[in-house]
Image (cartoon, rainbow, N blue to C red):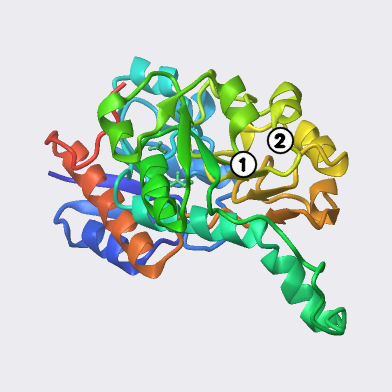
Amino acid sequence: WAMEVFVTRRIPAAGLRALSEAGGCTVRQWDSDEPVPRAELLAGVAGKQGLLCLLSDRIDKEVLDAAGSSLKVISTMSVGFDHLALHEIKKRGIRIGYTPDVLTDATAELSVALLLATCRRLPESVEEVKNGGWTTWKPLWMCGYGLSDSIVGIIGLGRIGQAVARRLKPFGVKKFLYAGSRPKPEIAAEFEAEFVPVTRLAEESDFIVVTCTLTPETEGVCNKDFFCRMKKNSVFINTSRGAVVNQEDLYNALVNGQIAAAGLDVTTPEPLPADHPLLSLKNCVILPHIGSATYATRNTMSVLAANNLLAGLKGEPMPSELLL
Ligand code: GLV
Ligand code: GLV
């Protein structure tokens, strides 16, 4: 048993250790915090049996062709898989590992943090303290919207969406709505959440949290029509993938006062250029895709990604295989 794998980035030491301690596994790595240049990626995968990649690596036909027929397993250190050319990968009989479950709590926690930061205007408030805007306590200053008695709409009541609802419920949410590809009555029962068309979710929610997978069906669903249906005092949160949102439509909705505020942990592109129009808006809070960023979660993700890769290379069941 002798296998060569390519790791596209510096990852937590625990993950790399799991690979290097597996006898017979030779690791080549782009050992940097910066993304692997495309040419290095193409050269790096050539002749390898395994590829450990990140959500920022686009694994398309060109990469698969560069890898050649040796490639047996792709293991992404992410729950999202929209960066993988699934059809091309399946065609070649390559197995895919990913990291669901282990990042659910961290990502749900970040979603709640972003929601609260956005609806209670925390970044703006912090800025006012620093820039001298805090002159006295003012009854009408820095008011936002709270969760008590609110209606929360969740787009994608999957693992992360459920964990968000579970955390928001104690804040006094009055009702949960959810939209997605199909109703999930057993799961929704815990929150007495009602399955509704995305149009109705937009119209009735005070807070909307997007936690769905990016697929051809969800791409751009938060568009002009969607934002026009939202209430003027409602808050929009996205911690899934930027492409679920039409950003130009979101910008217009925020500028025209069609919605109150937005909090985004994901954008298109990533990183968002520092001069992007959305960054000029006080009612838009943007984070650099840190949903799963706790030390413990990133460690666990790296070990799971390594174990998925090793199991796949040995032809064994993976701890978390993406079955197409
Ligand atoms: C993060 O966005 C992930 O897909 O793990
Ligand atoms: C998010 O990725 C989910 O599981 O819904």
> Residue 188 placed where, x, y %?
33, 32
Q: Are marks 1 and 2 in contact (CB under 8 Å)?
A: yes
Compared across the picture, whether 286 is left or right of 240 comes to: right
* Numbered label attached to residue 57: none
Q: Is mark 2 within 8 Å of ligand 2?
A: no
Residue at x 29%, y 20% (from the top left corner): 93
- Front in this rendered view, residue 48 or 138: 138
| On-image quarter of the C terminus | top left
> Residue 246 placed where, x, y %?
71, 30
Residue at x 50%, y 24% (from the top left corner): 215
* Numbered label attached to residue 231: 2
Q: Amino acid at mark 2?
A: Lys
Q: Residues within 10 Å of mark 1 (few under 14, many from 20)?
A: many
Q: Amino acid at mark 1?
A: Asp
Mark 1 lies on a secondary structure that is loop
The number of numbered discs placed on residues in the rendered structure image is: 2
**Residue on which the image places disc 1:** 206
